Amino acid sequence: MCLALPVQVMELLPDNMAKVGLDGVFKVISIALVEDVTPGDYLVLHVGYALAKIDTEEAERTLALIREATLGGAA
């Protein structure tokens, strides 16, 4: 089974890399597969690579569902 998570871009870095965050956890990932990434964008992240941009509403909806499934709705 594969899992891809929505993450928000915090900072663009050299060499097609970006710092992203999710619930206070930050990671440097490759954005080489996605065009026109800017800080604030939400990306779908899988094993260190951004696969696509998604809109804020979709990202928030997905994160809420993941939290509900894993934490029983607790934030």
Image (cartoon, rainbow, N blue to C red):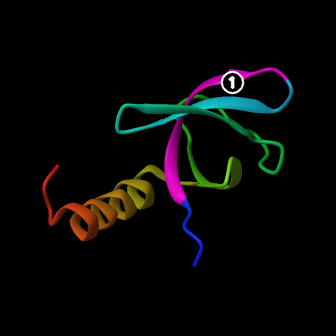
Taking the spot 27% from the left edge, 60% from the top edge, the residue there is: 67
The amino acid at mark 1 is Leu
Residue furthest to the bottom in view is 1
Please provide the residue range marked out in magenta. 5-14
Taking the spot 38% from the left edge, 63% from the top edge, the residue there is: 62
Q: Which corner quadrant holds the N terminus?
A: bottom right
The reply, left or right, for residue 35 in relation to residue 60 is: right
Which secondary structure type mostly characterizes the magenta part of the structure?
A: strand
Q: Is residue 62 above or below residue 28?
A: below
Q: Quadrant of residue 68?
A: bottom left
In this rendered view, identify the residue nearer to me: 23 or 41: 23
Taking the spot 36% from the left edge, 31% from the top edge, the residue there is: 24
The reply, left or right, for residue 39 in relation to residue 16 is: left
Q: According to the image, label 1 marks what residue?
A: 12
Residue furthest to the front in view is 1
Taking the spot 17% from the left edge, 49% from the top edge, the residue there is: 75
Q: Quadrant of residue 70?
A: bottom left
Percent position of residue 60, x then y: 35, 54
Percent position of residue 5, x then y: 51, 57
Percent position of residue 66, x then y: 33, 64
* Residue 7 is inside the magenta segment: yes
Q: Is residue 37 above or below residue 13?
A: below
* Residue 40 is inside the magenta segment: no
Q: Is residue 53 above or below residue 31?
A: below
In this rendered view, identify the residue nearer to me: 56 or 22: 22
Secondary structure beneath dot 1 equals: strand
* Callout count: 1
**Mark 1 surroundings within 10 Å by alpha-carbon count, few (fewer than 14), some (14 through 19), many (20 or more):** some
The reply, left or right, for residue 17 in relation to residue 20 is: right
Q: Quadrant of residue 4?
A: bottom right
